[in-house]
Image: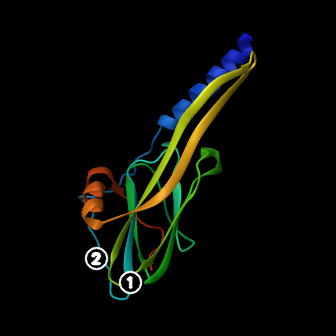
Amino acid sequence: MNPKNKRWTSGLLICALALAGCATVAEGPSGSEARIAEPKEGQALVYVFRSHAEPLAWGASVFVNDRKVATLRQRTFTSVYVTPGPQTVKAKWPMLSGQLDGVLTFDAVERQTYYVELVGTTRLKDLSLESPRHWVMTFAVGSGLVGWRAEAAKPQIDRCCRYQKAEFSH
């Protein structure tokens, strides 16, 4: 490999690793300091949190029933009131993140609270030299939304996350 290609390949790898390691943390109150809301009459409450989801450098936009709620970065959470009935929570990653979107559906019951975690992984699966001038990097990526029980979710949010106000609430 000539020196110019080595520098370019090394620079690309360094940039990819740097982006994977960056994270922005919200400045709101921690989970333990934020006032925990109660579901209102005629509504249900949905918490969405991101304790750790890769890639770290990118925020994922969270939608509830096709309305954007927030862009969650590492160690943040938000909440939104919803009308009881079928719910669709989606996490959409920026295209440049290389990450796949996640979807979770459930039926919300009046005066119930639901906890949803955004999860994701990005791993270098393989780095191989295909020819003297051709490196191939293969990544394994995956993302999803996982429902949690309240007794497990509340302590997790308290330990990890800062509150981020939702962009809308019913």
Q: Does 6 sit above or below residue 111?
A: above
Q: How many marks?
A: 2
Secondary structure found at label 1: loop
Q: Residue at x 59, y 52 (%)?
A: 100
| Percent coordinates x, y for residue 60 in the rendering | 52, 55
Residue 20 seen: yes
Q: Does 111 sit above or below residue 24?
A: below
Mark 1, Cα crowd under 10 Å, few <14 / some 14-19 / many 20+, is: many
Task: Judge left or right: residue 16 versus residue 53.
Answer: right
* Residue placed under numbered mark 2 in the picture: 38
Earlier-in-chain disc, 1 versus 2: 2
Secondary structure found at label 2: loop
Q: Which mark is residue 80?
A: none
Q: Nearer the viewer, residue 123 or 165?
A: 123
* Residue placed under numbered mark 1 in the picture: 43
Give the residue type at disc 1: Gln
